[in-house]
């Protein structure tokens, strides 16, 4: 009996079979890996916004002054409704409306633009006031290339508390613009 073939490895058919199984496994794993990356990116952005909201609420209480969270538009001023271009937090000492960062007002936090996410809000700015005083409520929606079925919202109550939801404040499906 010749045992030399057992020492030379796999045949061509066995090798092709192993390669085809690996290809099938990779093609089924890549879409779920992409989904996992997109979910992770969205969750990180939402967590950062929620932490910023908590920070702004705390600063309003600590300073006993109004603190504003608004879309930054890539600069040191409140921009339009494009929250995906970043946001900023500042103490609005003169309480102007619309909120404007003046040279004597402290800039507390700046978040640069986000990649791969589209954020829309129903408010141009969120004002956080000291404890016991009503703040501005609203919703910020996070969308990506998957559309509304994967969208998430950060809903801010009148007391300034954020919560994350897959539906809007009226319990309806989220809309991506």
Image (cartoon, rainbow, N blue to C red):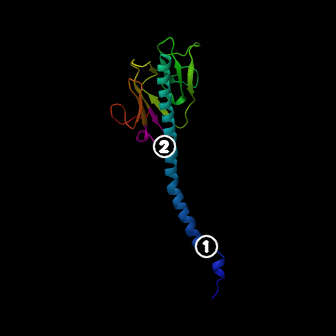
The quadrant of the image that shows the C terminus is top left
Say the numbered circle drawn on residue 12: 1
Label 2: few (<14), some (14–19) or many (≥20) C-alpha neighbours in 10 Å: some
Q: Badges 2 and 1: C-beta atoms under 8 Å apart?
A: no
Query: What kind of element bears circle 1?
Result: helix
Of residues 103 and 174, the one nearer the viewer is 103
Tell me if residue 117 can be seen: no
Q: Which residue is mark 2?
A: 39
Residue at 49% of width from left, 35% of height from top?
47
Up-down relation of residue 26 to residue 129 (above or below): below
Task: Locate residue 137 relative to residue 115 in the image: left or right.
Answer: left
Front label number (2 vs 1):
2
Residue at 64% of width from left, 80% of height from top?
5
Say the numbered circle drawn on residue 109: none
The quadrant of the image that shows the N terminus is bottom right
**Magenta-drawn stretch contains 77:** no
Up-down relation of residue 50 to residue 80 (above or below): below
- Residues rendered magenta in the picture: 141-151
Classify residue 75 by image quadrant: top right
């Amino acid at each position: 009996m010749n045992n030399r073939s057992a020492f030379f490895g796999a045949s061509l058919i066995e090798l092709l079979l192993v390669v085809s199984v690996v290809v099938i496994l990779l093609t089924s794993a890549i879409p779920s890996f992409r989904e996992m990356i997109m979910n992770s990116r969205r969750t990180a952005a939402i967590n950062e916004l929620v932490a910023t909201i908590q920070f702004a609420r705390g600063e309003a209480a600590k300073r006993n002054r109004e603190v504003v969270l608004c879309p930054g538009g890539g600069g040191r001023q409140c921009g339009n409704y494009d929250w995906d271009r970043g946001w900023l937090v500042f103490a609005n000492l003169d309480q102007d409306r619309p909120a404007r960062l003046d040279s004597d007002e402290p800039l507390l936090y700046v978040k640069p633009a986000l990649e791969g996410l589209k954020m829309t809000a129903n408010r141009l700015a969120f004002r956080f006031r000291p404890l016991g005083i009503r703040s501005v409520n609203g919703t910020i929606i996070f969308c990506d290339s998957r559309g509304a079925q994967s969208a998430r919202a950060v809903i801010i109550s009148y007391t300034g508390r954020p919560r994350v939801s897959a539906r809007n404040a009226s319990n309806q499906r989220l809309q991506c613009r």
